[in-house]
Amino acid sequence: MEPKNCWEVMNCGQNPISKINSKTEICPAVKNSEFDGTNNGKFAGRACWIIAGSFCLENKKGAFSGKIMSCLYCEFFEKVKNEEGKNFISIPEISENKSK
């Protein structure tokens, strides 16, 4: 079974297609391709806790440093951590090669 992304588990109404069809603000986790594949997710769908301005329970969250404590207690964070096991990536390493 394919791992679920945050928008599929949290039922927030966001998804990668909504960035094309919606006139409302789109969650940055849905459109951040820099972390595509992290924890086997699409875009940042399984690393939403590191994305500044990501939405959570319909609330827009701020920078990583201001939200990480609430993310560490999030059911979705725990779900991804358990599913990924020893391969879990809590804070992806940003490679200079990715941006080239």
Image (cartoon, grey):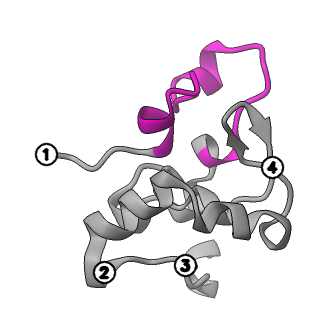
**Left/right of residue 28 with respect to residue 14 in the rendered view:** right
- Please report whichever mark, 4 or 1, sits nearer to the chain's N-terminal start: 1
Q: Secondary structure at mark 1?
A: loop
Please state which amino acid type lies under the numbered disc 1: Met
Q: Name the residue carrying label 1.
A: 1
**Left/right of residue 57 with respect to residue 59 in the rendered view:** left
Q: Residue at x 64, y 61 (%)?
A: 71
Residue lying at the far front in this picture: please name it.
73
Seen from the viewer's position, the closer of residues 29 and 31 is 29
Q: Name the residue carrying label 2.
A: 87
Q: Name the residue carrying label 3.
A: 92
For marks 2 and 4, give the CA distance: 26 Å
Please state which amino acid type lies under the numbered disc 3: Pro
Q: Name the residue carrying label 4.
A: 61
- Please report whichever mark, 4 or 3, sits nearer to the chain's N-terminal start: 4
- Is residue 14 located in the magenta-colored stretch of the structure? yes
Q: Which residues are magenta?
A: 6-29
Q: Quadrant of the C terminus?
A: bottom right
For marks 2 and 3, give the CA distance: 11 Å
Q: Residue at x 42, y 49 (%)?
A: 42
The answer to whether mark 4 and mark 1 are in CB contact below 8 A is no
The answer to whether mark 2 and mark 4 are in CB contact below 8 A is no
For marks 4 and 1, give the CA distance: 30 Å
Residue neighbourhood size for the residue with mark 4, other residues' Cα within 10 Å, grouped as few (<14), some (14–19), many (≥20): some
